[in-house]
Amino acid sequence: MTIMNKEVVIIGGGPAGLAAAVELRKKGIQEIVILEREKQLGGILRQCIHDGFGLTRFKQTLSGPEYSQRFIDLVKKLHIEYVTDATVIEITSMKKVIAASKDGLLEYRAKAVVLAMGCRERTRGAISIPGTRPAGIYNAGVAQSYINLHNTMVGKDVVILGSGDIGMIMARRMTLEGAKVKAVFEVQPYPSGLPRNIEQCLNDYGIPLYLSHTITKIKGNARLEGITVSQVDENMNPIIGTEKDYDCDTLILSVGLIPENELSLACGVKLDSRTKGAIVDENYQTSVAGVFAAGNVLQVHDLLDFVSLEAEGLADSVAEYIQQGELTDCPIDIVTDNAISHTIPQKISGKKDFTLSLRVRKPFKNCHIDVMQSDTVIRTVLLKKAIPAQMIQVKLKETDIKTLDNIKVVVR
């Protein structure tokens, strides 16, 4: 097996990996390779044929394939090397990367590794829905792939569990293809997806959304025949006596996304129990020196544009690491109150400007986000509303940071 030396190996050829590669080349990094396990570059965007991408990044609304093609064109124009049909099977803390490809095993030795593997969907098993196991139950992304990439309709009478964005987009897509989408059920007392998708994908098509509901039984043997839905209490336990039956031949699950970090863990990268992604500093560097992470493998984003922008921000740090051999230490931890689910980054140096990304755990109205150090508020952001589905970004300057004390972020 030939060993190939690279300045940067990027794992994943989706929106994060492509954007990082282009920006790294623009910063003068020459020896880059993108490793992608699918047959084509583009990641999940290949099957996202609806529009709504690109307004922030390109000031223009694009479909998923149109959005990814812009980066793919740049990758080819800049002569950035990529290998498709290549599944990475090992990353080490010494930045050795081994991939299985159609040409056999490939081994790379890199100065830096960029993790851009995206995320995967939670399954029925993860949420323990009781009942039989018939055909006709799909994760939203799988159903989307069947319809948009393989021209195969998955059912006619549909119920959707989970009000995540992919589920709501599939409610509209199934309706446009002639299916009857009877309802979307959400276990939380508030929607999981963006308000614009509730309007454009559900309300515009008369599809009802029921909050504080979950599926308590699945019926059918060879093929799904129906489901039972129940209301849930404040602890998300089904309320006896509220059961209601729905006949359907298809159930689509949109019950959350999990960053794909099995390779990261094997490499020694420490994960955040809240995001399920890596713990990173302001440089997007993980706990393993020279290994960086961005995109949905780091945190599940609300808008695709932020995936690309985050990866482009990461490129600055990767280029600096390659040129200097190390980055400034980040001794300041960022902690939160219980109203905030997580922040990215989790550590900073206090010597750079940075953008803090965060989400709240429940909806708030007329609130403000306070960033504090030593009980002193160093930055405040006023918001008319804050909902869990939307990321909040707070820009802080080096001059805002006064000491090496930890930073605390709270909602008031």
Image: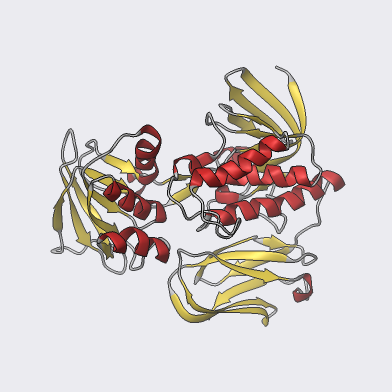
The percent position of residue 47, horizontal first and vertical second, equals 44, 41
Q: Is residue 366 above or below residue 46?
A: below
Q: Is residue 303 above or below residue 269?
A: below
- The answer to whether residue 385 is seen in the rendering is yes
Which residue does the image show at 60% across and 73% down from the upper left? 409
Q: Is residue 143 above or below residue 378?
A: above
In the image: residue 185, left or right of residue 257: left
| Along the viewing direction, whichever of 147 and 6 lies nearer the viewer | 147
| Along the viewing direction, whichever of 316 and 276 lies nearer the viewer | 316
| Along the viewing direction, whichever of 10 and 281 lies nearer the viewer | 10
The percent position of residue 396, horizontal first and vertical second, equals 70, 71
- The answer to whether residue 272 is seen in the rendering is no
| Image quarter in which the N terminus is found | top right
Residue furthest to the front in view is: 60
Which residue does the image show at 45% across and 70% down from the upper left? 387
Q: Quadrant of residue 13?
A: top right
Residue furthest to the right in view is: 324
In the image: residue 105, left or right of residue 208: right
| Along the viewing direction, whichever of 162 and 346 lies nearer the viewer | 162
The percent position of residue 235, horizontal first and vertical second, equals 32, 66
Q: Quadrant of residue 378?
A: bottom right
The percent position of residue 240, horizontal first and vertical second, equals 16, 63
In the image: residue 143, left or right of residue 412: left
Which residue does the image show at 54% across and 72% down from the upper left? 337
State the colouring used for the structure image. Answer: secondary structure
